[in-house]
Image: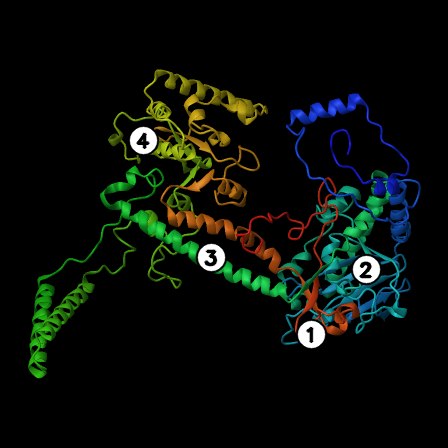
Amino acid sequence: MNPLNIQMLSSGLHQQIFGDIQVEYSDEAVQKSIEHLKSHDLWNQETSILPDVELQLPKMYGSNIDEHFCILAQKQSLPYLEAAHELVHCDLPEMPTEWTWAVGWTKYDPAGRTNPVDFPDDKALVFDVEVCASESQCPTLAVAVSPSHWYSWCSKRLIETRYTWSNQLTLTDLIPLETSANSTRPRRDEWPERLVIGHNVSYDRARVKEQYLMKVGAWDWVNISSINNLPDVHALYVGGRTLEKESRELFINGTMKDIRENFQELMRYCANDVKATYEVFCEELPLFLKRCPHPVTFSGMLEMGQCYLPVNHNWKRYQDEAQGTYEELQREMKQSLMNLANDACQLLHDERYKDDPWLWDLEWGTQEFKQKKDTKKKKEELVSTGEVANSSLTSEFEEDPGPPSEDRNEEEVKAAKSRALLNDLHQTVSLLPKRRQHLPGHPGWYRKLCPKWNDPQWLPGPSLISLQMRVTPKLMRLTWDGFPLHYSESHGWGYLVPGRKDNLLANPSDTDAPSCPYRTIEILHQEYCKKKSPGQTDESEVSVSDEFMLTENSMWEMVEELSHLETEHEADFGNGSVKNSAQEVQLPEFLENSCRSYHLGNGPINEVNVPGCWFFKLPHKDGNRNNVGSPFAKDFLSKMEDGTLQASTNATSATRALEINKMISFWRNAQKRISSQIVLMLRKSELPRTVTRHRSYDEENEYGAILPQVITAGTVTRRAVEPTWLTASNAQDALRLAG
C-alpha cells in the first residue's frame, strides 16, 4: 500500500519488473494528493484489497521495462520494417499496357512477358481488390505490385460464364497470397514474413484466402489511410493530377457483364489505385517514423491489422433468432401504436381533444359523408324489395313449417328481419359517390395513418403508423420532465412549459387557430412533481400552482427580462460568441423550483408562439443549435431509462411501445452491419488438427471466421475503429435484443 492507501504491485512482481528501485514519497506530494482526492470526495473511500500475486515473469530484455518493450517490438517488427524500406526506396517497374484475361494470378516482368503463378512470392506488395457489389461479396479482380513485378488476379466468376453461382463463400472464391489453389499449407510448411500495403486494407484482407485459416500466415497489413478516400489522401500528400474515380461506379452499380465488357479499362483503374497507394506510402512512412519513433507503435499497428474472430454454427442461429424476435416485437409495437391512434380518434366526440396537452394542434377536420340524391323510384324499389322479402319469408314458412316451436319461430322471424335489413343496406350502395371517399367522418391526422381501400398493401386501421412519424410522440403522450412534447417546424422537437402571459388572447374564439390547453399542462406537471417528490407539502404545491396561474406582476417582469436576455444571446451567437447553457438565459424562479432538470432543454424560444406556454428545445448531442428530429433516436435511450423522457400516466400502450423501442434499438441499428459481415465456414480438411482433434469438436457443426473491418488508426488520435466489433455496448442491459 502507498501512503494514499492505494494497493500497489506485490513485492515479488515489483522486484522482477523494477529491480531494487525503491519509491520515495515526499510529505508535500502526499499532502497535495490527499487534498486533491478530498476535493472530489475520493479520500478515505473503501476499496477492495486483492491478495498478492506470485507469478514468475519471462526474462526481461534490457535493464528496465521500457527497454524490454523496445527490444521486443524491434524484434517483432524488424522484418516488416525492412520490407517497407525496400519498397519505399525502389523504382517500380512499368505498368503493363495490356492485362491478361485468365483465372488466377498472372505475373508481368519488365520485358513484357507474362507468366501464370500460384501467388506473388515477393516480400512486400502494394495491393488492391475490386468487388462487383451487385453480384456478391466475392473478389472480382485484383492488382498488386512489388519492387520487381506487376501482378493481376481474376476470379472464376469473372472469366467463366455460368447460369448461377453459389451464395456460400468458400476458400476457392478468395485470393491466394501464400498457398496454391487447392492447398491450405505453404511450400515446405514455412510462413515467411511478408508485408501488404493498401488503402482501407482491411476490406482487401477480407478477400484473401489465407487470412481465414486458423493458423494464419506471416503477412502483416499496413493501412496508409482510411479516414479519407484515396483521391483526397493522394492530393494531400502527393499532389499532381486528380485520380479518376468514375470507373468505380461500374463495380458499385454495374453487373459482371459490364465488368467483362470494360475489362482493360477497369484493370487500369485498379492498377492506378495501386500506384497511387504506393506514392502515398512513400510520403507517409518517413513522416510516421518521425512522429511515432517508438517501435511499439509500428508493431502495434501491424498487430491490429490482423484481427481474427472465430465463429461457429451459433452465428447463424444468433441472427435468425434475433431477427425473428425483432419482427415479433415490431408487430407488437405497431399494434400498441395503432391502439393509441384508435383511442385518440375517440376524442373527436364532444371536441375533447381541445383539452389534451398533446393532441390539441393536430388536424381534427373531417370530411363530410357524401351520397347521391335518392329518387322516388329508388324508394319504391326499396319498398318493393322489402315486400318481396316478407313474401319470401311467408312462402318459406308455407313450404316447410317444421315442427311447432315458439323459440324456432322467433329465431326465424329475427333472421328474416336481419336479411331484409341487409338487403335494404345493400340497395344503398347505389347512393355512394362514384369516387369513394377515404374514411369520411374521421379526423385528417387519422386518415393519413390508414391506407386507402385500393392500396395493394391495405390493412384495416391505422396500419401506416410508425415511430418515424411526427404524430407518434404525441399519441404516446411523451413528456420531458413532466412537460408535454411539442413539435416546431423551425426548431424540431421540444416541450411546452406553462407560464407565458405575453401571447395570451383576450378572446380565444376570435381566431381559427387551435388554442393550447395550458391550464391542463399546469395540472399535468403538478401531478408529475407529486409523483417525483412524494413528501411534498400542500403549502409548496399551492405555491407552485399559484405561480403557474400567473397572478403576480413580478412574473410578467421576469418574462420581459427573459425575452431581453434571449435577444442578447442570439446577438452573441451572430458575433461568434457562444455562452454555455447556464449563462444563456436567467430562467423564471418558479420553473427552477418546479422541476430541477427540465432546463437541459434549450430555450425558452419566444418565436414559437404557443399561447400560455414557453417552448424549450430538446437537447441535441451535437449542440443546442441543432434541432432534434426524433425523440426516439438512440441518443435519448439514457433519458428514457432515467425517466426524463417517458410516457404520461395511464398510457399502458405507450409505455409498452417505449419499452419495445428500447429493446429493439440495438438490433435495429446494428442488423445491417451484422448481416453484411463476411463469414467463411471452413471444411474439416481446412481446419487445423488442434481443432478437429479437440474433445468438443462436432462434425455436425460448422466452424469458421470473420475478419473484422478494423481501421487501425481511424481517428485523429490514432484510435482503432470498427463499426460493429469495436462499438461499446451496455452489457448490463439484459432486456436489449441481440446486445
Can I make out residue 292 in this image? yes
Q: Quadrant of residue 550?
A: top left
Q: Name the one closer to the observer, 415 or 559.
A: 415
Q: Which three-letter amino acid code belongs to the residue tagged 2?
A: Ala
Q: How many marks?
A: 4
Q: CA distance from mark 2 to mark 3?
A: 49 Å
Q: Which three-letter amino acid code belongs to the residue tagged 3?
A: Leu
Q: Which residue is mark 1?
A: 699
Q: CA distance from mark 1 to mark 2?
A: 38 Å
Q: Secondary structure at mark 4?
A: helix
Q: Which residue is mark 3?
A: 329
Circle nearer the N terminus (4, 2): 2
Q: Which three-letter amino acid code belongs to the residue tagged 1?
A: Glu
Q: Which residue is mark 2?
A: 144
**In this rendering, is residue 379 above or below 739?**
below
Q: Which residue is mark 4?
A: 519
Circle nearer the N terminus (2, 3): 2
